[in-house]
Structures are given as C-alpha cells and as structure tokens.
Image (spheres, grey):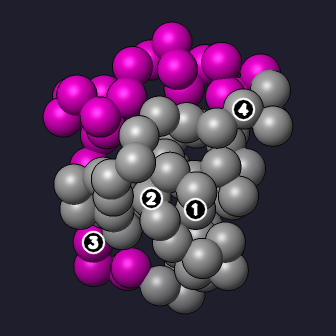
Amino acid sequence: MTTTPLMPKATAVWLVENTSLSFEQIADFCRLHPLEVKAIADGEAALTIKGLDPVLTGQLTREEIDKAQADPKHRLG
C-alpha cells in the first residue's frame, strides 16, 4: 500500500490493542513514527481515539496481519 490508511492513528490504536505486530510494522503501515506508536502502546498518546479495525474497513486482511505477526520483517499492505 502506498497511501496512508484511513484514520492512521485510530488504525494504529486498533493494531496495538489487537495484534502482536511490532511498533515498526504498525508505524510503517500507518505512516507514523515508531516512537508515536510506542506512546500509543504506553498510554501516553491517542488516549481519546477509538481503535479502527483495518480489516473491517478493507485496508488489510486477517491473513496479512497473521503473516506479519509470524514474520517481524514482513511489511503490511
């Protein structure tokens, strides 16, 4: 995927809360800095943002997420 996902911070929140993807994988997919993803995971950023499921919005497939969780070097999208 070459474009930023719909609502990147909300997508990052969902990926942090619902997957075991690395901060780098999430940051790369959502076009955020890895430290911003870490801040989301640590509860220091995006506190009022509700997570947006990228599978329901058609941005990713469950299979793609599973593949990326199994291989930390795999890039989403």
How much space separates mark 2 and mark 4, taking CA atoms?
14 Å
- Marks 3 and 4 sit apart, C-alpha to C-alpha, by 27 Å
Residue placed under numbered mark 4 in the picture: 74
Secondary structure under the numbered disc 4 in the rendered image: loop
Q: Main secondary structure of the magenta part?
A: loop
Task: Kindly identify which numbered label has been placed on residue 27.
Answer: 1
Name which of mark 1 and mark 4 comes first in the sequence.
1
Q: Is residue 56 magenta?
A: yes
Q: Nearer the observer, disc 3 or disc 4?
A: 4
Magenta span contains residue 42: no
In the image, taking residue 63 as reference, residue 4 lies left or right, namely left
User: How crowded is the residue under tag 2: few (<14 C-alpha within 10 Å), some, or many (20+)?
Assistant: many
Give how far across and how far down residue 75 sits, in percent: 64, 38
Residue depth check, mark 3 versus mark 2: number of the one nearer the observer = 2
| Residue range of the region highlighted in magenta in the rendering | 46-70
Circle 4: is it few (<14), some (14-19), or many (20+) Cα within 10 Å? some
Label 2 close to label 1 by CB (< 8 Å): yes
Contact, CB < 8 Å: mark 3 with mark 1?
no
Q: Earlier in the sequence, mark 3 or mark 4?
A: 3
Rendered image quadrant of residue 8: bottom left
Q: Nearer the viewer, residue 27 or 14?
A: 27
The residue pinned by badge 3 equals 49
Q: Return the residue found at the far front.
A: 2
Q: Is residue 74 left or right of residue 8?
A: right
Which residue is found at the position 67% from the left and 72% from the top? 34
As drawn, 21 above or below 27:
above
Q: Give amino acid for label 1.
A: Ala
Q: Distance of mark 3 from mark 1, alpha carbons?
A: 16 Å
